[in-house]
Amino acid sequence: MAESVADIDRGGAAAPGGPPPAGPRTVAPLVVGGVLTAVLLSLAGRYGYHRDELYFLLCGRHLDWGYVDQGPLVPALARLADSIAPGNLVVLRTPSAFIGGAAVVLVAAIARQFGAGRVAQTAAAVLAAASGIVLAGGHLLSTTSVDLLVWLAAVLCVVRMLRTGDTRWALGAGLALGAGLLNKPLPALLGVGLVAGLLIAGPRRLLRDRWVLAGAGVAVLLAVPYAAWQAVHGFPQLDVAASIADGDSSYSGRVDAVVLQFLIISPFAVPVWIAGLVALLRRPSWAAYRSLAWAWLVVPRSWWWPAARATTTRRCCWCSPPPEWCRPSGGRDGVRPGPGRRCWSPPPC
């Protein structure tokens, strides 16, 4: 376990020079993240409820292990915030503001694992703080906010594992992915991409490592409650996916998914992440991390599956009829609410 996985590539030969050591520590990313969180909190009350936030608040009043298009995590956060300070937008959005700051720190931490110096880590933090996905996810309470934190935390654990060879970091990645699967199914795509990356670029022996298998088990175990809820109710998320595939969403097309990577992440960061992707595929000293580049190339292909694309965006539930499984006449295959529960649906427009 102590042997660095950088010493093993697809052919079993040692990677020239191995991965560079981690860069020096610096407090600059913490400062950037703290400033971003303070700014987000100061502006949190200056924009009224987003329609998704109203949806989460309503879901939070009917807590369950799942909903038609998401897991229980964000509705539970909305319920907690509304219990602490009913109708207070700042309190409702406080978790997202701290997630935005944490995302900045995590981006810089990942850069440090690749050997970035203090200046490069600070630049990574600033680029992250200026990206649309961090600013939007940090301003509004949404499943995207949690998703951002989950993906970055999981990737940091994987990069640390690949650099040091300590496969116990797989437990951290599994914990992050499992928590994310209580938010929505999208982190499963990251897991699939990482496995595919290891199959393509190696080291494949990680797929048989006991700690990696334990991390996968943790992720699956945490996902069981939401998966069971979907199964009991006839997988309503597939119906939502079909609706989105038919164009019933603000962002429904495959082209939108590609374009948004350039716009939401930040046009200023595009040259940086493209250069980083090329370096992951070509730089000899980063051969240990090549599976991450392949993971990125594999994950977007999953968007061609409508159910996967359903997790990238959500229809406006306020302007749609109640789902089939939640109608008074009984749902598909006769599914009805459990004892002591009653169905509810958003009011019409």
Image (cartoon, grey):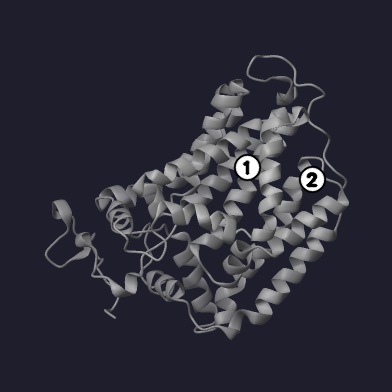
Q: Residue at x 77, y 40 (%)?
A: 114
Q: Residue at x 70, y 25 (%)?
A: 5
Judged left or right of residue 304, residue 332 is: left
**Disc 2 from disc 1: Cα separation:** 18 Å
**Total numbered circles:** 2
In the rendered structure, find residue 79 and report the number of the disc placed on it.
none
Look at label 1 and name its amino acid.
Gly
Residue 85 percent across, percent down from the top left = 54, 82
Q: Residues within 10 Å of mark 2 (few under 14, many from 20)?
A: many
Which quadrant of the rendered structure holds the C terminus? Answer: bottom left
Q: Secondary structure at mark 1?
A: helix
Residue 318 percent across, percent down from the top left = 33, 74
Q: Is residue 183 visible?
A: no
205 relative to 220, above or below: above
Q: Residue at x 31, y 57 (%)?
A: 240
Task: Tell me where residue 62 sits by quadrant.
Answer: bottom left
Look at label 2 and name its amino acid.
Arg
Q: Nearer the viewer, mark 2 or mark 1?
A: 2
Q: Residue at x 65, y 64 (%)?
A: 100
100 or 310, which is in the foreground?
Answer: 310
276 or 7, which is in the foreground?
Answer: 276
Task: Tell me where residue 320 sits by quadrant.
Answer: bottom left
Residue 26 percent across, percent down from the top left = 86, 54
| Residue pointed to by mark 2 | 112
Judged left or right of residue 78, residue 320 is: left
| Residue pointed to by mark 1 | 172
Q: Is residue 224 visible?
A: yes
Q: Secondary structure at mark 2?
A: helix
Which quadrant of the rendered structure holds the N terminus? Answer: top right
Say whether disc 2 or disc 1 marks the residue closer to the N-terminus.
Answer: 2
